[in-house]
Image (cartoon, grey):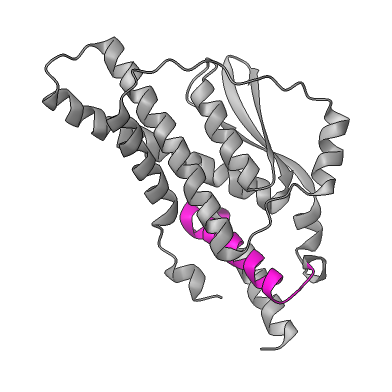
Amino acid sequence: MCKDDILSKITKLLNMTQENGASEAEALTAIQVAQRLALENNLDLSGLEVAEQVREVVEVETETKSSRPNPLIKRLANVIAKNFRCVSVIRHYCGKQYILFIGLAKDAEAGKQVFNFTVGQIKRLSEAYLKTRRKSDNFWGSQKGKLVKADYVLGFIDGVKSGLEHNAVQYGLVTTRPQEVKDHLNKMRLRFTGNAVINTYGSTDARQCGFRDGHDSIRQRNQSKVLSCA
Protein backbone atom coordinates (compact mmCIF):
# COMPACT_ATOMS: atom_id res chain seq x y z
CA MET A 1 0.00 0.00 0.00
CA CYS A 2 1.45 3.37 -1.01
CA LYS A 3 1.92 6.32 1.33
CA ASP A 4 -0.95 8.31 -0.22
CA ASP A 5 -3.38 5.43 0.35
CA ILE A 6 -2.35 5.14 4.00
CA LEU A 7 -2.68 8.89 4.55
CA SER A 8 -6.12 8.77 2.95
CA LYS A 9 -7.23 6.05 5.36
CA ILE A 10 -5.84 7.93 8.34
CA THR A 11 -7.70 11.06 7.25
CA LYS A 12 -10.96 9.10 7.02
CA LEU A 13 -10.39 7.65 10.49
CA LEU A 14 -9.67 11.06 12.03
CA ASN A 15 -12.88 12.39 10.50
CA MET A 16 -14.97 9.66 12.16
CA THR A 17 -16.43 11.83 14.90
CA GLN A 18 -19.82 11.90 16.58
CA GLU A 19 -20.59 15.06 14.62
CA ASN A 20 -20.13 12.99 11.46
CA GLY A 21 -22.40 10.17 12.64
CA ALA A 22 -20.00 7.83 14.49
CA SER A 23 -20.76 6.47 17.94
CA GLU A 24 -18.54 7.24 20.94
CA ALA A 25 -16.93 3.81 20.69
CA GLU A 26 -16.34 4.09 16.93
CA ALA A 27 -14.82 7.57 17.27
CA LEU A 28 -12.48 6.38 20.04
CA THR A 29 -11.34 3.30 18.14
CA ALA A 30 -10.92 5.32 14.92
CA ILE A 31 -8.42 7.62 16.61
CA GLN A 32 -6.52 4.66 18.04
CA VAL A 33 -6.32 2.88 14.68
CA ALA A 34 -5.24 6.11 12.95
CA GLN A 35 -2.43 6.59 15.47
CA ARG A 36 -1.36 2.98 15.04
CA LEU A 37 -1.25 3.29 11.24
CA ALA A 38 0.82 6.47 11.49
CA LEU A 39 3.29 4.85 13.88
CA GLU A 40 3.58 1.60 11.90
CA ASN A 41 4.33 3.50 8.70
CA ASN A 42 6.49 6.20 10.28
CA LEU A 43 4.18 8.93 8.99
CA ASP A 44 3.99 12.52 10.18
CA LEU A 45 0.40 13.64 10.67
CA SER A 46 1.45 17.14 9.62
CA GLY A 47 1.18 15.82 6.05
CA LEU A 48 -2.59 15.49 6.36
CA GLU A 49 -5.17 18.09 5.40
CA VAL A 50 -6.47 17.96 8.98
CA ALA A 51 -2.99 18.54 10.38
CA GLU A 52 -3.59 22.14 11.44
CA GLN A 53 -6.64 21.10 13.45
CA VAL A 54 -4.82 18.09 14.93
CA ARG A 55 -1.92 20.21 16.22
CA GLU A 56 -4.09 22.98 17.65
CA VAL A 57 -4.38 23.00 21.44
CA VAL A 58 -8.01 23.41 22.46
CA GLU A 59 -10.17 23.35 25.58
CA VAL A 60 -13.11 20.98 25.05
CA GLU A 61 -15.85 21.37 27.63
CA THR A 62 -18.51 18.97 28.86
CA GLU A 63 -21.06 19.58 31.61
CA THR A 64 -21.41 17.16 34.51
CA LYS A 65 -24.76 16.36 36.10
CA SER A 66 -23.69 17.58 39.53
CA SER A 67 -23.03 21.12 40.71
CA ARG A 68 -21.03 19.87 43.69
CA PRO A 69 -17.36 18.83 43.61
CA ASN A 70 -17.13 15.08 43.10
CA PRO A 71 -13.73 13.44 43.66
CA LEU A 72 -14.85 10.35 41.72
CA ILE A 73 -15.64 12.45 38.63
CA LYS A 74 -12.29 14.19 38.99
CA ARG A 75 -10.44 10.87 39.21
CA LEU A 76 -12.23 9.47 36.14
CA ALA A 77 -11.48 12.61 34.11
CA ASN A 78 -7.80 12.47 35.10
CA VAL A 79 -7.48 8.82 34.04
CA ILE A 80 -9.05 9.49 30.64
CA ALA A 81 -7.18 12.75 30.06
CA LYS A 82 -3.82 11.10 30.72
CA ASN A 83 -4.54 8.34 28.21
CA PHE A 84 -5.42 10.92 25.54
CA ARG A 85 -2.40 13.14 26.24
CA CYS A 86 -4.61 15.84 27.79
CA VAL A 87 -5.13 17.55 31.12
CA SER A 88 -8.55 17.64 32.74
CA VAL A 89 -9.66 20.71 34.67
CA ILE A 90 -12.83 21.20 36.71
CA ARG A 91 -14.51 24.56 36.31
CA HIS A 92 -17.56 25.93 38.17
CA TYR A 93 -19.72 28.80 37.05
CA CYS A 94 -23.42 29.73 36.99
CA GLY A 95 -24.10 26.99 39.52
CA LYS A 96 -22.88 24.25 37.19
CA GLN A 97 -19.78 22.04 37.04
CA TYR A 98 -17.82 21.48 33.85
CA ILE A 99 -14.88 19.30 32.86
CA LEU A 100 -12.36 20.78 30.44
CA PHE A 101 -10.13 18.49 28.40
CA ILE A 102 -7.11 20.51 27.32
CA GLY A 103 -5.00 19.00 24.54
CA LEU A 104 -4.60 18.67 20.81
CA ALA A 105 -7.94 18.96 19.03
CA LYS A 106 -8.50 15.27 18.24
CA ASP A 107 -7.12 14.12 21.59
CA ALA A 108 -9.31 16.49 23.61
CA GLU A 109 -12.44 15.62 21.65
CA ALA A 110 -11.75 11.90 22.09
CA GLY A 111 -11.22 12.42 25.82
CA LYS A 112 -14.57 14.20 26.08
CA GLN A 113 -16.39 11.46 24.17
CA VAL A 114 -14.90 8.67 26.27
CA PHE A 115 -15.62 10.59 29.47
CA ASN A 116 -19.29 11.08 28.57
CA PHE A 117 -19.55 7.44 27.51
CA THR A 118 -18.05 6.10 30.74
CA VAL A 119 -20.14 8.41 32.94
CA GLY A 120 -23.24 6.98 31.29
CA GLN A 121 -21.97 3.45 31.76
CA ILE A 122 -21.21 4.07 35.43
CA LYS A 123 -24.72 5.38 36.06
CA ARG A 124 -26.41 2.46 34.32
CA LEU A 125 -24.20 -0.37 35.56
CA SER A 126 -23.82 0.87 39.15
CA GLU A 127 -27.61 1.08 39.50
CA ALA A 128 -27.91 -2.49 38.21
CA TYR A 129 -25.24 -3.69 40.67
CA LEU A 130 -26.83 -1.92 43.65
CA LYS A 131 -30.24 -3.34 42.77
CA THR A 132 -28.78 -6.84 42.90
CA ARG A 133 -27.02 -6.17 46.22
CA ARG A 134 -30.20 -4.81 47.83
CA LYS A 135 -31.98 -8.08 47.07
CA SER A 136 -29.23 -10.26 48.56
CA ASP A 137 -28.16 -8.22 51.62
CA ASN A 138 -30.01 -8.58 54.92
CA PHE A 139 -29.36 -4.96 55.86
CA TRP A 140 -29.39 -2.05 53.50
CA GLY A 141 -29.65 1.65 54.20
CA SER A 142 -29.21 4.75 52.08
CA GLN A 143 -25.81 5.52 53.61
CA LYS A 144 -24.56 2.00 53.02
CA GLY A 145 -25.76 2.21 49.43
CA LYS A 146 -23.76 5.40 48.84
CA LEU A 147 -20.60 3.87 50.30
CA VAL A 148 -20.94 0.61 48.34
CA LYS A 149 -21.55 2.62 45.17
CA ALA A 150 -18.30 4.51 45.82
CA ASP A 151 -16.51 1.14 46.01
CA TYR A 152 -18.07 0.11 42.72
CA VAL A 153 -17.20 3.38 40.96
CA LEU A 154 -13.59 3.26 42.19
CA GLY A 155 -13.32 -0.26 40.80
CA PHE A 156 -14.93 0.89 37.55
CA ILE A 157 -12.39 3.71 37.16
CA ASP A 158 -9.53 1.27 37.76
CA GLY A 159 -11.07 -0.98 35.10
CA VAL A 160 -11.30 1.91 32.64
CA LYS A 161 -7.63 2.69 33.28
CA SER A 162 -6.69 -0.94 32.70
CA GLY A 163 -8.72 -1.10 29.48
CA LEU A 164 -7.20 2.10 28.11
CA GLU A 165 -3.70 0.91 28.93
CA HIS A 166 -4.46 -2.38 27.17
CA ASN A 167 -5.57 -0.43 24.10
CA ALA A 168 -2.41 1.67 24.16
CA VAL A 169 -0.25 -1.46 24.15
CA GLN A 170 -2.35 -3.23 21.51
CA TYR A 171 -2.36 -0.29 19.09
CA GLY A 172 1.12 0.99 19.95
CA LEU A 173 -0.23 4.39 21.01
CA VAL A 174 1.94 7.20 22.32
CA THR A 175 0.41 8.66 25.49
CA THR A 176 3.15 11.21 26.24
CA ARG A 177 1.74 14.73 26.44
CA PRO A 178 2.83 16.80 23.39
CA GLN A 179 5.06 19.83 23.91
CA GLU A 180 2.37 22.12 22.49
CA VAL A 181 0.05 21.08 25.31
CA LYS A 182 2.74 21.59 27.95
CA ASP A 183 3.45 25.09 26.64
CA HIS A 184 -0.27 25.91 26.66
CA LEU A 185 -0.63 24.74 30.26
CA ASN A 186 2.36 26.82 31.38
CA LYS A 187 0.65 29.92 30.00
CA MET A 188 -2.57 29.10 31.87
CA ARG A 189 -0.80 28.89 35.25
CA LEU A 190 -3.21 26.34 36.63
CA ARG A 191 -3.22 25.36 40.30
CA PHE A 192 -3.41 21.60 40.76
CA THR A 193 -4.70 20.07 43.98
CA GLY A 194 -4.32 16.59 45.42
CA ASN A 195 -6.96 13.87 45.45
CA ALA A 196 -9.73 14.29 48.03
CA VAL A 197 -10.55 11.51 50.47
CA ILE A 198 -13.26 9.19 49.13
CA ASN A 199 -15.36 7.42 51.74
CA THR A 200 -16.21 3.81 50.89
CA TYR A 201 -17.80 0.79 52.54
CA GLY A 202 -14.81 -1.44 51.83
CA SER A 203 -16.73 -3.90 49.67
CA THR A 204 -14.34 -6.18 47.77
CA ASP A 205 -17.19 -7.53 45.70
CA ALA A 206 -18.22 -4.03 44.59
CA ARG A 207 -14.65 -3.13 43.66
CA GLN A 208 -14.17 -6.33 41.66
CA CYS A 209 -17.49 -6.04 39.84
CA GLY A 210 -16.81 -2.37 39.10
CA PHE A 211 -13.37 -3.19 37.73
CA ARG A 212 -14.76 -5.87 35.45
CA ASP A 213 -17.53 -3.62 34.15
CA GLY A 214 -15.16 -0.69 33.60
CA HIS A 215 -12.62 -2.80 31.76
CA ASP A 216 -15.28 -4.44 29.60
CA SER A 217 -16.92 -1.09 28.79
CA ILE A 218 -13.68 0.12 27.22
CA ARG A 219 -12.57 -3.14 25.61
CA GLN A 220 -15.82 -4.56 24.26
CA ARG A 221 -16.76 -2.14 21.50
CA ASN A 222 -18.10 -2.54 18.03
CA GLN A 223 -15.09 -1.97 15.78
CA SER A 224 -16.57 -3.20 12.50
CA LYS A 225 -17.12 0.28 11.08
CA VAL A 226 -13.63 1.42 12.04
CA LEU A 227 -11.80 -1.67 10.84
CA SER A 228 -13.48 -1.39 7.46
CA CYS A 229 -11.55 1.86 6.99
CA ALA A 230 -8.20 0.54 8.25
Where does residue 12 sit, x and y in percent of width and height? Answer: 62, 70
Q: Is residue 23 visible?
A: no
The residue sitting at 53% across, 50% down in the picture is 164
The residue sitting at 77% across, 56% down in the picture is 53
Q: Identify whether 219 is placed above or below 199.
A: below
Q: Is residue 165 visible?
A: yes
Q: Identify whether 42 is placed above or below 135.
A: below
The residue sitting at 65% across, 17% down in the picture is 93
Q: In this image, 161 relative to 201: left or right?
A: right
Where does residue 44 sit, x and y in percent of width and height? Answer: 80, 69
- From the viewer's side, name the closer residue of 200 and 226: 200
* Residue located farthest toward the bottom when viewing the structure as drawn: 1
Magenta-tinted stretch: 19-44
Where does residue 200 sit, x and y in percent of width and height? Answer: 38, 18
Q: How many marks?
A: 0
Q: In this image, 153 relative to 27: left or right?
A: left
Secondary structure mostly taken by the magenta-highlighted segment of the chain: helix
From the image, which quarter does the C terminus lie in? Answer: bottom right
Where does residue 16 sit, x and y in percent of width and height? Answer: 57, 62
Q: Is residue 222 magenta?
A: no
The residue sitting at 47% across, 17% down in the picture is 198
Q: Is residue 25 magenta?
A: yes
From the image, which quarter does the N terminus lie in? Answer: bottom right
